[in-house]
Image (cartoon, helix red, strand yellow):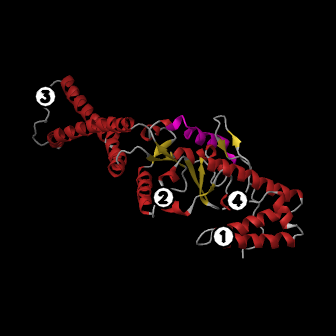
Amino acid sequence: MARSAKKGKVSPSASIMSSSGVSTPSSQSSSGPLPPFSKAPDYLRPFLEPLSPNEIYLVHIDTSAMDLKRQSFFMPAAINAIIIAVIAFRVYTGLHVYPAMLAALFGLTSPLSVDTSISSMDLVWVILQRTLMILIDYSLVSLFLAWPIRFVLGPVKWRHAVGFRDREIVVRHSQRHVTENLERNRWIREDDAMRDKIVAAVTPDRLKKTGYLLIDADWDLDYDAMIRAHGLADQAEKDHGVPLDEFRTAVLVNTDADGWLIWHVGDKDTPEGRARSAQRDQILAFKDKLAALGKEDLFFRWVEIVQYESTRPGGFTPDRQKSAMLQAKKLFEDEGVDFALFWREIGGLEGLPDFVL
């Protein structure tokens, strides 16, 4: 039996529309996942566990042209190859220059020893030349060397593992400055500006760009996550992975109370999404009707029962659905509510267990 203790009041709320036309969660405070967010399914756990709980993740399937994907990779690859070649050349020439320069610095005879009898202007010119050379070499190493290193550990590693595909899973994570000032567990309900920033990053027009071109000041690609996601999608063909469509456009956030939450952004435009929207309206009607009877606590206790039965190993089987119904019937009747009549008046709640997980 599910525990009958009162839960914190869950307030499933309707979504509000942002200026971009994409539905975003309202800022109404409530406990439990705030629609349209819901708990991420267990089968995504291998993908989610390595992610940072302090960052926001955006997932979608890149269907842009194969030529665009190749160009967006090979152009920066060529630039990084040039940088590596320049640095390698300077390392090669520096093997002869810097030892001789150090020898001269310590008063040893070397090709770069300076005749102190030369004019002061010539001496200044020699010092300026060598200082400029050191500054250029320092800049090459400190500023530019990181570019090819990141490129090899990121895009090259990703393309080597995944290759180029017609449908590619793209995973972006928020840059550190985006989330460092967000108040964990609260911003998802209260920070309208952050939600608008997320919506702007997942609009259809924005996602027309190929994945590598979506890197900007707020979002960066998570190459390890993309490799891991494709690994799971490839395993789906062997019945122990995750279908690629499960990585359709979504927002992933982590909260202390509910763990990883997911919002499949585009689902509102699919038959499944419209069905879930209808379910959302139905569950709101269910709650409002109980509230009108002064029995709002019954709603939260009913949610608790469904959560308990549906999250047990094996899923929400017909037997467990029947068990949940019998428990709810007893719960309602103990509170003086005609369960059968109430159920008929709201038209039943088929499919709603998915909504309250």
Mark 2 secondary-structure assignment: loop
Please report whichever mark, 4 or 1, sits nearer to the chain's N-terminal start. 1
Q: Earlier in the sequence, mark 1 or mark 2?
A: 2
Mark 1, secondary structure of its residue? helix
- Residue 137 left/right relative to 68: left
Q: Secondary structure at mark 3?
A: loop
Q: Is residue 4 visible?
A: no
Number of the front mark, 3 or 2: 2
Instruction: Report the magenta stretch's main SS.
Output: helix
In this orientation, does residue 96 appear? yes
Q: State how far apart marks 1 and 2 are (Cα).
A: 24 Å
Q: Magenta stretch: give its range.
A: 189-207
Mark whose residue sits in front, 1 or 3:
1
Q: Is residue 202 magenta?
A: yes
Q: Residue drawn at (75%, 56%), measured in percent from left and top?
A: 283
Residue that mark 4 sits on: 352
On residue 242, the disc is: 2
Label 2 Cα neighbours within 10 Å, binned few <14 / some 14-19 / many ≥20: many
Mark 1, residue position:
318
Image location (x, y in percent) of residue 18 = 67, 38
Q: Secondary structure at mark 4?
A: loop
Q: Which residue is mark 3?
A: 117
